[in-house]
Image: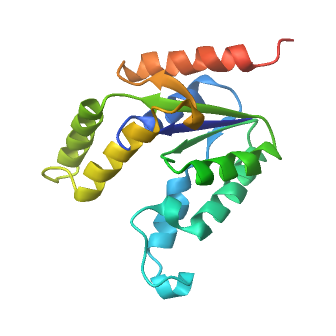
Amino acid sequence: MFVLLNGSFGIGKTTTARRLVEALPDTAISDPEHVGFVLRRLPAFLLGLSRQPDDYQDMALWRRLIVPQARWVHGRAKTVVIPMAFTNRSYFADFVGALEGTGPVTKLCLVAPLDVIRSRLLERGTAEGRAGLTRFELRRSEECVAAHADPFFGQPIDATASPEAVSADILAVLSRKSPKK
């Protein structure tokens, strides 16, 4: 099973994914950002691009590579949690469709008001020694909040609560979706 954990930057996807791995047996994380980190370090011309896009999801090669990455992790774990920040419907639908050929897909989306997300991003930036939010963080957080109001991107999960409560809500959803023995 694949658990797509969509949500804005700074909303707590990675923290939640780690808690789910701790709570569920035979579960692992497939983080698409790791593929993006590698691709962003390559010169654009090696990728057939005139310039690097601002966001990984706009890179066709990234979208193609994250599918086999998730499938590879699925070969080692029964449940794969994939934290991501998709806002493009077509990209998201293609990713979901590609994974459905391998196993069941549960789409969840962590949601919170824009001010909560920006406050969390600011805290993270301060912890990393940055002051203020970048233009990218400001733009993408607004885009994510707008897009993720649409249940197309996954069943909404209120992310304003504590990480423990968010994880508990997700575990409850997953237990309802699991086949009964």
Q: Where is residue 100 drawn, in percent x and y?
A: 78, 43
The colour scheme used to paint the residues is rainbow
* Front residue of this view, candidates 168 and 105: 105
What residue is rendered at 49% in x and 47% in y? 87
From the image, which quarter does the C terminus lie in? top right
**Above or below — where is 175 with respect to 112?**
above
- The x and y percentages for residue 131 are 12, 51
In-front residue for pair 49/72: 49
Query: As drawn, is 175 to the left or to the right of 16?
Result: right
Count of numbered marks: 0
Residue at 23% across, 32% down: 115
Q: Quadrant of residue 62?
A: bottom right
Q: Residue at x 74, y 53 (%)?
A: 72
In this picture, residue 156 sits left or right of residue 128: right
Residue at the bottom extreme of this rendering: 45
In the displayed image of the protein, which residue is found farthest to the right? Answer: 181
Quarter of the image for the N terminus: give it: top right
Q: Residue at x 22, y 35 (%)?
A: 119
Camera-side residue of 31 and 173: 173
Query: Measured from the top left, where is residue 73 in percent x and y?
Result: 70, 49
Vertical comparison of 78 with 61: above or below: above
Position of residue 27 in the picture relative to residue 116 (left or right): right
For residue 24, above or below residue 99: above
Q: Quadrant of residue 47?
A: bottom right
Determine whether 43 is above or below 108 in the image. Answer: below
Residue 12 position in % (x across, y down): 40, 34
